Amino acid sequence: MTRITPIGCGLFLTLLAGSVCAADLQVEVRGVRNAQGKIMIGLFDSAADFPTKMVQGLALDAAAPGVTGMFTGLPNGDFAVAVYQDENGNGKLDKNLVGVPTEPYGFSRDAMGRMGPPRFADAKLKVDGTSQTIVIHLR
């Protein structure tokens, strides 16, 4: 006969709870003006890393008027999303001489920054174990 110890049972329940709390985040990107290049979607989980060091990323073929991407199995927590259309396929958001983006971009909650990207706090959304859909408008 196999005995399950309280520690083993607790570990099992912790692992089970972790998988139950996983959620999906669907990102609808609207305002794609042409079918050139890729729509790059980055998911960030901290203010320190936003918007430079993503935890997950998606590259979708651009299609007007919009595209949809999905992040799956996310743990509970705060996240922010940054999007840009890499129209020329060089793998980066192009900017002019003074640092203003020349390719379309956007952030979760349609947050806007002053003289740069918005703060993580302005773009963050809470993942709480339920799947959700957000819409980001490119500008």
Image (tube, rainbow, N blue to C red):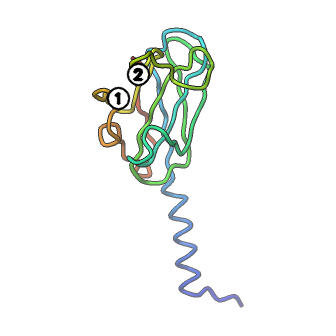
1 or 2: mark nearer the eye: 2
Q: Are marks 1 and 2 in contact (CB under 8 Å)?
A: yes
In the displayed structure, would residue 115 be above or below residue 71?
Answer: above
Residue drawn where x is 56% and y is 76% of the image: 11
Residue drawn where x is 48% and y is 31% of the image: 27
N-term mark: 1 or 2: 2
Amino acid type of the residue that numbered disc 2 sits on in the rendered structure: Gly
Residue drawn where x is 55% and y is 49% of the image: 73
Amino acid type of the residue that numbered disc 1 sits on in the rendered structure: Gly
Quarter of the figure with residue 62? top right
Quarter of the figure with residue 89? top right
Q: Could you tell me which secondary element the residue under label 1 belongs to?
A: loop
Is residue 40 left or right of 105 when viewed as pictured?
A: right
Residue 51 in the image, given as x and y percentages of width and height: 44, 37
Figure quadrant of the C terminus: top left
Residue drawn where x is 71% and y is 90% of the image: 1
In the displayed structure, would residue 120 be above or below residue 75?
Answer: above
Numbered label attached to residue 48: none
Assess disc 2: are there few (<14), some (14-19) or many (≥20) residues with their C-alpha within 10 Å of its C-alpha. Answer: few
Quarter of the figure with residue 118? top left
Residue occupying the far top of the picture: 34
| Residue corresponding to mark 2 | 99
Q: Could you tell me which secondary element the residue under label 2 belongs to?
A: loop
Assess disc 1: are there few (<14), some (14-19) or many (≥20) residues with their C-alpha within 10 Å of its C-alpha. Answer: few
Residue 58 in the image, given as x and y percentages of width and height: 58, 33
Residue occupying the far front of the picture: 97
Tell which of 56 and 5 is nearer to you: 56
| Residue corresponding to mark 1 | 116
Residue 134 in the image, given as x and y percentages of width and height: 41, 32
Q: In whole angstroms, how far apart are the C-alphas of marks 1 and 2?
A: 8 Å
